[in-house]
Image (tube, rainbow, N blue to C red):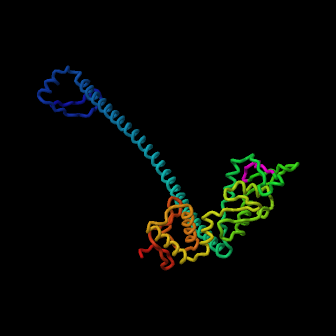
Amino acid sequence: MIKYITLSYLGLYMPKRNLYLSDDDVELWDELPKGERGRILRDLLLERKSKEILSKSSENMVISQKEKNRNELLEQINSYTKDLQKYQKDLKEIEQKIGYHNMKKTQTQNAILDTEDRIKSLQYEYNENIGSLFLPGLWDEIYSAAKSRVGEVFNHPAHKEKMWAFRIKTVKNGKIEIERLDKEEKYSSFITRNTTNQVEQKLEDNWHGDKQIQIKSGALLGDYGVECSIVKLSEKMKYKNESILYEVPFFAQYSKMLSKYSIEECISAMNRQVEKIQNGGGGAGSARGAFYAALKDRFLALGFDTSSFISNEDGHMAMSFQKKIKLLDGKIIQSDD
């Protein structure tokens, strides 16, 4: 054991410490030059102190880097959290809009169905109380034909001796312009959809269910140029002497015939057609196809539930002839009888 005793002559009273050394360490201690042992010991203590300070500094540096990384990660987490909250808010707004639009879509679909039912009801009321207009489509026919015949000049066939001359001058904006050429001062008349509606109504008023409608020239409209142009442009109309003949389409003929049929009469007509088909008869043909279409429309116009044999296929209402039908509790159903 080595005992350190402070030197009183220095006037210093330093703390005492006992230092325990092994035999080997004592030999090393004794080899140290006297007078320098304190300095050497102090240097060792200071060196150790420096190492401790350096170690703590290094540890602090490591902690500081971890803190930096921690802060960076927290910033990213906070940033993505804000983004998430924004996306969740946007999604909620979109879902609300989708819900609103789905609601409006449903309301519109219901409005369409209600309107279609209302139209059918009014059409049925019109057909029953006033009479149907079975000869539509004249405007679309002649307007399409006139587009390819602009500039064509023609005379009035029923009044050849008068040398009336007309020309299809223009076809645009829903109007067909007919120019009068046999007058010194040229002028034009116009054909519109309203004009052909009047013609269709006039033909309807003079139709008694025959295959042809005959009406005297001049009685159709009063304007010979317009009358002649319509007759020339329509494939269903022609002049015969001083009369106009209109070939009534099969569909219109059958529609007029069936317009007075009751639901029981329609069912009987349908079942007769089913029997013909099952026995190898029926078949195709423009007349038969027109009859089927007219019969289907009559069923729909009567307002009964026809879903068992009339369905929507690719946007078109199709009627099935696989089985006979019957009326049961206000609904028309297919029957195996």
Question: Which residue extends farthest left?
Answer: 23
Q: Position of residue 163 (x, y in %)?
A: 82, 52
Residue depicted at x 49% and y 54%: 91
| 194 is within the stretch colored magenta | no
Q: Nearer the viewer, residue 306 or 28?
A: 306
Q: Quadrant of the C terminus?
A: bottom left
Q: Residue at x 59, y 70 (%)?
A: 117
Instruction: Check the image and report above or below for 126 versus 250.
Output: below
Residue ID at (38%, 37%):
64
Q: Is residue 247 above or below residue 303?
A: above
Magenta region, mostly helix, strand or loop?
strand
Question: Outermost residue, bottom direction?
Answer: 329
Which segment did they paint magenta? 165-174
Compare residues 217 and 25 and report the one nearer the observer.
217
Look at the image and tell me in which quarter the N terminus lies. top left
How many numbered marks does the figure carry? 0
Q: Which one is nearer the viewer's eye here, 318 or 261?
A: 261
Looking at the picture, does residue 61 appear above or below residue 231? above
| Position of residue 240 in the picture relative to residue 56 (left or right) | right
Tell me where residue 103 appears, x and y as whole percent.
54, 63
Question: Percent x, y for residue 214?
Answer: 72, 65
Residue furthest top as drawn: 33
